[in-house]
Image (cartoon, grey):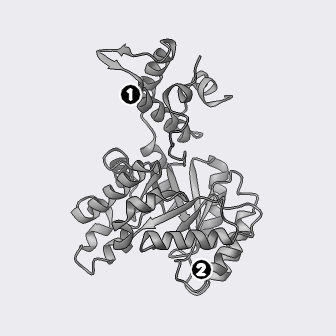
Amino acid sequence: MIHPRQALFDPEESAAPALPVCDHYAGVETRMRKSLQLQAEMGPVFDVTLDNEDGAPVGGEVDQAHLIRELLDSPDNRHGRVGVRLLPMDHRHFADVAAIVLRAAKAPAYLMLPKPRSLAEVERAARALDALGAGAIPLHALVETHGALREVFAIAAHPRIESLSFGLMDFVSAHRGAIPASAMAGAGQFDHPLVVRAKLEIAAACHAAAKTPSHCVFTEFKDTRALQAAAEMAGRLLGYTRMWSIHPAQIRPIVEAFAPTVAEVDEAIEILQAAQAAGWAPIQHGDQLQDRASYRYWWQLLERAERTSFHGGLQLPAEVHANWFGAA
């Protein structure tokens, strides 16, 4: 039988990268080590981003880079899903830090570019990193300035960019007090029109370019119920397929919020198995017509279910996993 990927997608069609739905940030050594240990235990259902910018000590950037290099090469980096947030392009230690990180035997899964102000700045950073030997490493960028938001579609389309993240707090601060502090925390970040507009622009730009939109932090890390509600809103209302975590307690709620429900997975399996049996021709499921356009939706939902499967969480049936995603 023809596999869903072969039946439903043009071989020339760009597919969004299959990134984990959670991007966990850590910049203090004890938390960095604990994050890597947790990832080693849970599996690659979340990325770890080792922070050399806002989450790291000011003035110790070079020492932090050496620590990050050590952690990249540590035994706890088992899955190859550890990235690094670099310094802004105009920081005097940008090249020094990048060069140290890139000397790690295990290359970072991606390099995050903070605070770009334009497409030209992203291009300049990409050229500088490529000159240091990072040409095969995907780049992520933080959209947190007026200039980056203005050029977000062009930045998303850049061939070196894999994902764009929204930098909520820097974006709000860039409005010089015109956006209230309540928009930086809790449910308030889903209320202010300028913030919501920025989030939607980033998500739309990423989907247009087959890149991954990553939602910003939720700072109330002890309120897991509110966090899960925010993650569900980011994913189901604003079109995000990934979200930042800043505390280990946030990881599982984010993964669970971005995972499809059991009912959605069951429906997807029923539809796709019937479609495959019909040679991917249109079928009737219940009272609805399903064809290749809707099959693509259900297949992408199953791919997300596979990416969010972990011990103690939602698991695909063994037969489905073996038939469509490799050996069980």
Residue 236, given in percent of the width and then of the height, sits at: 34, 44
Q: Position of residue 41 (x, y in %)?
A: 66, 49
Q: What element carries label 1?
A: helix
**Position in image of residue 194 (x %, y %):** 24, 65
The relative height of residue 62 versus residue 245 in the rendered view (above or below) is: below
Image coords of residue 106 (percent x, y): 74, 60
Identified at 44% across, 16% down, the residue is 281
Identity of the residue drawn at 61% across and 74% down: 128
Q: Hey, which quadrant is residue 112 in on the image?
A: bottom right
Mark 1 to mark 2 CA distance (whole Å)? 45 Å
Point out which mark residue 294 bears.
1
Q: Earlier in the sequence, mark 1 or mark 2?
A: 2
Q: In which quarter of the image is residue 65?
A: bottom right
Tag 1: Cα neighbours inside 10 Å, few (<14), some, or many (≥20)?
A: some
**What residue is drawn where x is 54% and y is 38%?**
12
Q: Which mark is residue 94?
A: 2
